[in-house]
């Protein structure tokens, strides 16, 4: 029973993540055209440069650091869940720092007319490493532990945190401290969900044991 629920939940999260990231590309194209019509070529160039730097570096950095916490199939379910949570936290923390720096860079360098398209465009640039990760996952070039730790919930929560932060910046002009709090809260929520999934999976496994 729990297994079917877990599969449904994971499928739902992956579907939402996939749709969100696909919408990211569309939003990036629209916002780029918007910025071009405003003559904001510097923002476009800055975004391209940032993407060219983060796409190869961020996934590799997360993979290298996460390799320290790799688990084996023979490890206990508790150890596996702890390792996956650590990997998720590492991935989220690195993506969080990258996202916050990108968001504030575009905010500080935007004008009144280019403020909204700059934020939308910055979201696409910030999610570029996540899209790169998904491409590696699809091609099977990542270790299973990294895939479990970074895909699904982690990708979804970093995306949600960025969207919520952007909305608060647009509506309330919040400071850096509030943005960090939003990202940290999203990370904790994602970890709670992962722990819950692990707990239900273990409970289901024990109930099915002869």
Image (cartoon, rainbow, N blue to C red):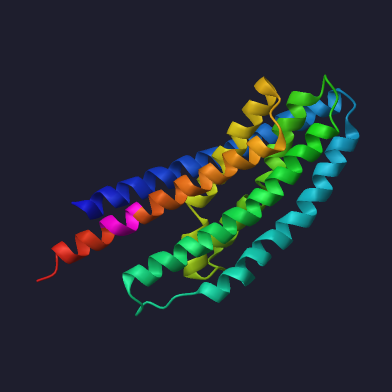
Q: Is 112 situated left or right of 1 in this image?
A: right
Q: Quadrant of the C terminus?
A: bottom left
Asked if the stretch drawn in magenta spans residue 90, the answer is: no
Up/down of 201 relative to 51, above or below? below
Q: Main secondary structure of the magenta part?
A: helix
Q: Is 134 situated left or right of 14 in this image?
A: right
**Residue sitting at x 63%, y 71%:** 64
Asked if the stretch drawn in magenta spans residue 197, the answer is: yes
- In this picture, which residue range is highlighted in magenta? 196-200
Hey, which quadrant is residue 29 in on the image? top right
Work out which residue is located at the far left of the displayed protein and give it.
210
Residue 197 horizontal/vertical position (percent): 33, 54
Residue 100 horizontal/vertical position (percent): 70, 43
Whether residue 18 is visible, yes or no, is yes
**Residue sitting at x 88%, y 30%:** 40
Whether residue 147 is visible, yes or no, is no
**Residue sitting at x 82%, y 19%:** 113
Up/down of 165 relative to 83, above or below? above
Residue 163 horizontal/vertical position (percent): 60, 34
């Amino acid at each position: 029973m729990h297994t079917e629920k877990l599969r449904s939940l994971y499928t739902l999260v992956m579907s939402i993540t996939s749709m969100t990231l696909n919408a990211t590309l569309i939003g990036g194209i629209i916002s780029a055209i918007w910025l071009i019509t405003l003559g904001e070529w510097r923002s476009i160039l800055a975004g391209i440069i940032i993407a060219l730097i983060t796409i190869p570096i961020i996934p590799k950095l997360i993979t290298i650091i996460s390799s320290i916490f790799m688990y084996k199939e023979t490890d206990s379910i508790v150890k596996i869940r702890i390792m996956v949570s650590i990997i998720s936290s590492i991935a989220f923390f690195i993506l969080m720092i990258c996202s916050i720096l990108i968001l504030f860079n575009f905010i500080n360098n935007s004008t009144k007319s280019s403020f909204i398209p700059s934020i939308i465009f910055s979201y696409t640039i910030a999610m570029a490493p996540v899209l790169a990760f998904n491409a590696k996952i699809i091609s099977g070039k990542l270790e299973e532990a990294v895939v479990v730790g970074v895909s699904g919930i982690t990708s979804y929560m970093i995306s949600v945190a960025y969207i919520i932060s952007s909305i608060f910046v647009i509506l309330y002009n919040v400071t850096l401290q509030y943005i960090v709090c939003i990202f940290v809260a999203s990370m904790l929520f994602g970890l709670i969900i992962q722990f819950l999934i692990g707990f239900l999976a273990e409970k289901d496994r024990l109930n099915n044991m002869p």
